[in-house]
Image (cartoon, rainbow, N blue to C red):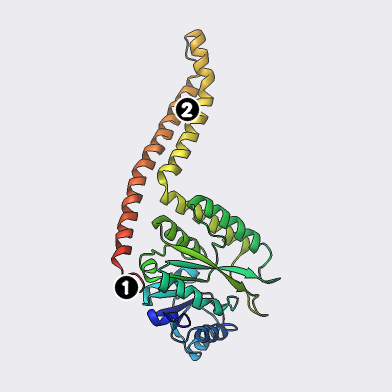
Amino acid sequence: MDKRNPASTGRVAVVIPCRDEALTIAGVINDFRAAMPEAEIVVADNASSDETAAIAREAGARVVFEPRPGKGRAVRRLLADVDADCYVMVDGDGTYDASTMPEMVDEVLANATDMVVARRIGTDGAFRAGHSLGNRMLSWVFSRLFRVELDDTLSGYRAMSRRLVKTFPVLTSGFEVETDLNAHTASLGLSYREIDSPYGSRPDGSHSKLGTWPDGIRILRRILRLFRDWRPMLTFSLVGLAIIAVTSVVVAPVVLDYLETGIVERQPTVLVAVAGYIVGLGLIAIGIILERISQVRLEFTRLLYLSLSSPGS
């Protein structure tokens, strides 16, 4: 394969979800076209109030519209409407380096890697205050829960195989979409890799739509929910056992009194203990049932994944 032209072995699409990026979108399109002229470039205008769509179209990109605000919704529209063998997802804010794309695409098309994440190597001032720390913390939590080795789980720049994209249910509406992509890859046991990529600052006049605290909390909640859906038996069993343990501590004095006196006192405590044991055991039973449902869902998704041809086949 020609290393200078990885697109020669498959169709490559650069998909760009963006909202109000009139200042930067033309530069992003031109940079990625220069890096890989064969790639199709598709922009999802996500309810922009400026001239993002017109400028993107003038720069030569195909433009689709998603009127409902939210990055997840824009990504859903792009991944559903665009057909390719390799998808390169990138933000339209001009912070990502297009020169990394050929290596990322080559990893997908030549080595059949399902997801290649651009690990952001930022210059001074590239990351907003709090974003770098928040990214490290959320990446650590995700990596520990899902047992994957990803340092930059929130990177918006990644290359993905057709098999990953067409089996990925985009269920979120906002900035949690990268977390969902990571969880989909981890839960199905798909191949992934990180590649270092330069990360720059937004130009003057361009503003991020990501809120450090509100979106950080939403992403953390999403991580925990995705883990619950992936490992329900573990999740519900831990909660159930915790309730049983607390109940046992509460009821222990009553049991000791009964053993000494033969009289059951503090009957309300006994009733609370019975309820606690029922709830705890019920949660464990629910976890066992949901675990089987989760496994069936993953098995069907895996079969759908295997039904799609791999890159180069």
Q: Residues within 10 Å of mark 2 (few under 14, many from 20)?
A: some
In this view of the protein, can residue 238 be seen by the observer?
yes
Labels 2 & 1 near each other (Cβ < 8 A)? no
Q: Which residue ends up furthest to the bottom in the rendered image?
A: 58
- Tell me where residue 203 appears, x and y as whole percent: 66, 80
- Tell me where residue 151 appears, x and y as whole percent: 57, 60
Image quadrant for the C terminus? bottom left
- Tell me where residue 273 appears, x and y as whole percent: 47, 26
In this rendered view, identify the residue nearer to me: 160 or 5.
5
The residue type indicated by label 1 comes to: Ser
The part of the image, by quadrant, that contains residue 274 is top left
Q: Secondary structure at mark 1?
A: loop
- Judge left or right: residue 66 versus residue 217: left
Residue where numbered disc 1 is placed: 313
In this rendered view, identify the residue nearer to me: 214 or 293.
293
- Tell me where residue 216 appears, x and y as whole percent: 58, 59
| Mark 2 or mark 1, whichever is nearer to me | 1
Compared with 286, 113 (above or below) is: below
Q: Residue at x 39, y 36 (%)?
A: 282
- Judge left or right: residue 66 versus residue 219: left
Image quadrant for the N terminus? bottom left
Q: Secondary structure at mark 2?
A: helix
Compared with 233, 304 (above or below) is: below
The residue type indicated by label 2 comes to: Val
Q: Residue at x 68, y 72 (%)?
A: 123
> What's the mark number on residue 118?
none
Residue where numbered disc 2 is placed: 272
Q: Residue at x 60, y 60 (%)?
A: 135
Q: Residues within 10 Å of mark 1 (few under 14, many from 20)?
A: few
Q: CA distance from mark 2 to mark 1?
A: 62 Å
